[in-house]
Amino acid sequence: MVLPMSLLRSAQNQPMMVELKNGETYSGVLASCDGFMNLHMRDIVCTSRDGERFWKIPECYVRGNSIKYLRLPDEVIDMVKDQPTTRKEIRQQFKGRARGRGGRGGGGGGRGGGRGRGGEAAGGPAGGRRAGGAADEKPNKRART
């Protein structure tokens, strides 16, 4: 099974043709894509809806929700088939690596995740205060005379 976003990511720096909902076609090289299927393309030949006019464009941005379909070379589809597709395969590929918050590998457990003020996680048993005792602290207002 080939997922659309993995197909697009593996198609980067490959030639492709995009037909928009308005009938225009853009043939060029895919530079990058994002999660909304927005495409950044280079070296494009744009063809009008009626197919009679052509424009050569050095680079363009295509909004994902205006795309009707994409045409990719067969080599791109073969590249995607070699990548892991199931969650189990992906988990096995990353097994043993450090994980984000919590889990194995340190990094503050429990509530707060070891970030923010106070507590031992912020800077030792002093609760994040500087060492040095009373000399570093401001005098109390009541102590002033």
Image (spheres, rainbow, N blue to C red):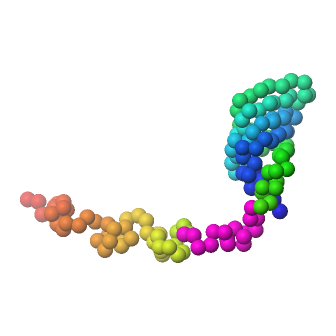
**Quick one: 144 or 42, which is closer to the camera?**
42
What is the quadrant of the C terminus in the image? bottom left
Where 45 sits versus 14, above or below?
above
Q: Magenta span has 53?
A: no
Identify the residue at the far left of this view: 145
Identify the residue at the far top of this view: 53
Q: Is residue 72 left or right of residue 137?
A: right
Q: Is residue 109 left or right of residue 66?
A: left
Corner quadrant of residue 86: bottom right
Q: Position of residue 23 (x, y in %)?
A: 87, 34
Corner quadrant of residue 47: top right
Q: Is residue 51 left or right of residue 30?
A: right
What is the quadrant of the N terminus in the image? bottom right
Q: Position of residue 101 (x, y in %)?
A: 52, 69
Q: Is residue 1 left or right of residue 31?
A: right
- Residue in the picture at 18% in, 61% down: 136
Q: Magenta span has 91?
A: yes
Q: Exactly how many numbered labels are in the figure? A: 0
- Residue in the picture at 75% in, 48% down: 11
**Range of magenta residues:** 83-98
- Residue in the picture at 63% in, 69% down: 94
**Quick one: 107 or 88, which is closer to the camera?**
88
Where 79 sits versus 45, above or below?
below
Q: Is residue 4 visible?
A: no
Q: Position of residue 68 (x, y in %)?
A: 85, 43
Q: Is residue 8 visible?
A: yes
